[in-house]
Amino acid sequence: MTATPTGPSARTSAGTAIRSAEVLVTSPGRNFVTLRVVTEDGVVGLGDATLNGRELAVASYLTDHVVPLLLGRDAHRIEDTWQLLYRSAYWRRGPVTMSAIAAVDMALWDIKARLAGMPLHQLLGGASRTGIMAYGHASGRDVPELLDSIRAQLAEGFRAIRVQTAVPGIDKVYGVSARPSTSGRYDYEPAQRAPLPAEEDWDSAAYLRHVPGVLEAVRNEFGPALPLLHDAHHRLTPIQAARLGKALEPYDLFWLEDCTPAENQETLRLVRAHTTTPLAIGEVFNTVWDYQTLLREQLIDYVRSSVTHAGGITALRRILDAAAQYQIKSGLHGPTDVSPVGMAAALHLDLAIHNFGIQEYMQHSGATESVFRTSFRWEGGYLHPGEHPGLGVEYDDDAASRFPYQAAYLPFTRLKDGTVHDW
Ligand code: EZ4
Ligand code: CO
C-alpha cells in the first residue's frame, strides 16, 4: 500500500473532512487575499493571506500548492496540518509561505470554534481581560496639523496614539497622511495603486534632528499620561537608533518601533545598552526564529507580528508564550493591510493571552467592511472580538465581486545621492 503524501491517517470520511478550499481576492479600497475552507458538513472557516504588494504570490502558493493538500483532510487536525505545510515544502519560512500557512491555520481555528459553538478566544483559554487596549494613528505635515490629528483620534475614543511627522527637507515621509482627517477614521495607506512601486526620498540626519522636538511639542500639549508611540520604520543604523531612543526618553514613549532594519537581531544589543525607551519590533518577521535572540537576551519589550504574517494563531501563540518568560508583551500589528479576518484572529489572541500589551487598530474603510462583516466591538478605546462562534467574520461574495484586484505596491526610498534605502 502506498501512503498518500499527507499520511493516510490525516484523511477522513467524517463530516469535518475539508470539501473545498478557495482563494478569494478582492480590492475594496485595497487588496485582500482570503482563504475560505468548507467542510463536508458545510461549516465555513476564513483565513487572511494578505501580503501587501505581493498578494498574488500568496494566492498562487495557496491555490497551486496548498489547496490540493487540504482536500479530504480532517479540519480538526490543526497542529498536524500546520506541521505538514511547514515541513513538507522543504523550503521553510519567508513571508509568502508563512502567510499561506497562516490563512489555513486561521480558517481551521475558525471552523473548530464554530463547531464548538464558541468564540475562538474560549478555545484559546478564555478571556484574560474585559477589553483590548488599542492605539490609533495620527500624523501631520507640521506640528499644528499633528496636534489636530491627535485630537481627532482622541475624539474617536483612542487612549493611546502613534505619532508620525513630516520632516523638513524630505518630500514624503512614511506614516504621514497627505490629508490627515480632522474627524473620524484616520486614513493612511502606504501602498499605491499603480503597476510599479513609487519612489520616495529619505534623509536620516534630517529625521533625527526633527523628531525629538515634535514629540516634545506633543507631550507638552497632551500632558504626561497619554501613551505615545512612534514608528521609525527600519530606517536607522544601530548607533542612530540608540541616539534617537536616548533623545526621546524625556517624552516617555510607550514604544519606539522598528528602529533598525529587521534582519539583524544582534543590532538591538547596542540600542538596548544606550536607552530605556521601550522597543517594539517584528511586523516583518515570520517565525519564532526571527525573535530568538531578541527574546532570550531581552532586547525588546513588544512583539509586533500579525497573525497573518507569522504563520497563524498556532505559531504566534508560541512566540507570545516564549516572550512571556521575559515579561515581553504583545503589540500585534494591525494596519489596514491585515484584513478584518486577520484582525479578528488578533483580537481573540489578545483577549486570551496573559502577556497582552497593546493592539494596533487602523479602522478599515466602509468598502472593506461591506465585504467583511465583523462582530468587533469598539468601546471607550477598547476592542472586543464579540461572542459569535468562530472568528466572528462573514465574507460577502456579492460585495467582494464589485471590487476586482488592482495592482498596488508599497513605495521604496532613495537617499539624496540616489542610493536605495530601507523604506
Ligand atoms: O508599513 O503594514 O506599524 N505599521 C507599519 C505599517 C506597514 C504596512 C506595510 O504593509 O509599519 O504601516
Ligand atoms: Co510598523
Image (cartoon, rainbow, N blue to C red):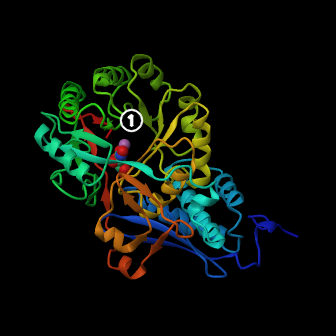
**Residue 131 horizontal/vertical position (percent):** 46, 53
Question: Which of 263/316 is in front?
Answer: 316
Q: Does the residue labelled 1 lie within 8 Å of ligand 2?
A: yes
Q: Residues within 10 Å of mark 1 (few under 14, many from 20)?
A: many
Q: Which amino acid does label 1 sit on?
A: Asp
Question: Which of 266/40 is in front?
Answer: 40
**Residue 334 horizontal/vertical position (percent):** 40, 52
Rendered position, 389 above or below 237: below
Q: Residue at x 68, y 55 (%)?
A: 88
- 134 displayed left or right of 296: left
Rendered position, 63 above or below 233: below
Rendered position, 24 above or below 198: below
- 322 displayed left or right of 421: right
Q: Where does label 1 land, which residue?
A: 258
**Residue 324 horizontal/vertical position (percent):** 59, 36
Q: Residue at x 56, y 29 (%)?
A: 293
Task: Please indicate, yes or no, whether residue 305 appears anywhere in the rendered image.
Answer: yes
